[in-house]
Amino acid sequence: MAGFLTTHVLDTARGLPAEGLEITLYRLRDGARDLVVTMRTNDDGRTDSPILPAERFETGVYELVFAAGDYLRATGQAGADPLFLDEVPIRFGISDPDSHYHVPLLLSPFSFSTYRGS
């Protein structure tokens, strides 16, 4: 297998990469949600290494959980509690063991979007 998984986060409200945002990756199988890794974004809004490198890459169902609320609080964008967005989960499938999967997050205090990037 030569595939790998990457992500990045852009703060669309500020027009900047989302630095210091915690991201947790889970693998889902047989009704269980297994922790794979937790990382933080760097000053470019990316993780310093693939969130799921080639040597750990497997097909299956995964969930990235972005700690948006902590980031929004730290950048002064949170607003009143409870936050509209706190944890942002993105559940997706990996079916090709040889592909690069890139799952970015575009984030603002009141919206988010994602797509399969390259």
Image (cartoon, rainbow, N blue to C red):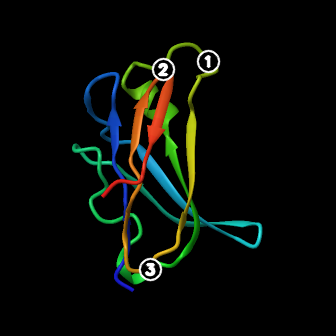
- The x and y percentages for residue 44 are 22, 44
How many residues crowd around disc 3 within 10 Å: few (fewer than 14), some, or many (20 or more)?
some
Q: Residue 61 lies in what quarter of the image?
A: bottom right
Q: Is residue 98 positioned above or below 36 on the image?
A: below
Callout 2–callout 1 Cβ contact below 8 Å: yes
Residue at which label 1 appears: 81
Q: Amino acid at mark 1?
A: Asp
The residue where tag 3 is placed is 97
Which quarter of the rendered picture does the C terminus lie within? bottom left
Residue lying at the far top of the rendered structure: 80
Expressed as whole percent of the image width and height from the top left, the position of residue 49 reads: 29, 64
Q: Residue at x 29, y 44 (%)?
A: 45
| Number of numbered discs visible in the structure rendering | 3
Can you tell which quarter of the image residue 63 is in? bottom right
Q: Are marks 2 and 3 in contact (CB under 8 Å)?
A: no
Q: Looking at the image, which residue is at 41% across and 54% down?
A: 116
Please, what secondary structure does the residue beneath circle 1 have?
loop
Q: CA distance from mark 1 to mark 3?
A: 41 Å
- Residue placed under numbered mark 2 in the picture: 78
Crowding around mark 1 (Cα neighbors within 10 Å: few <14, some 14 to 19, many 20+) is few
* Amino acid, disc 3: Pro
In the rendered view of the protein, which quadrant contains the N terminus? bottom left
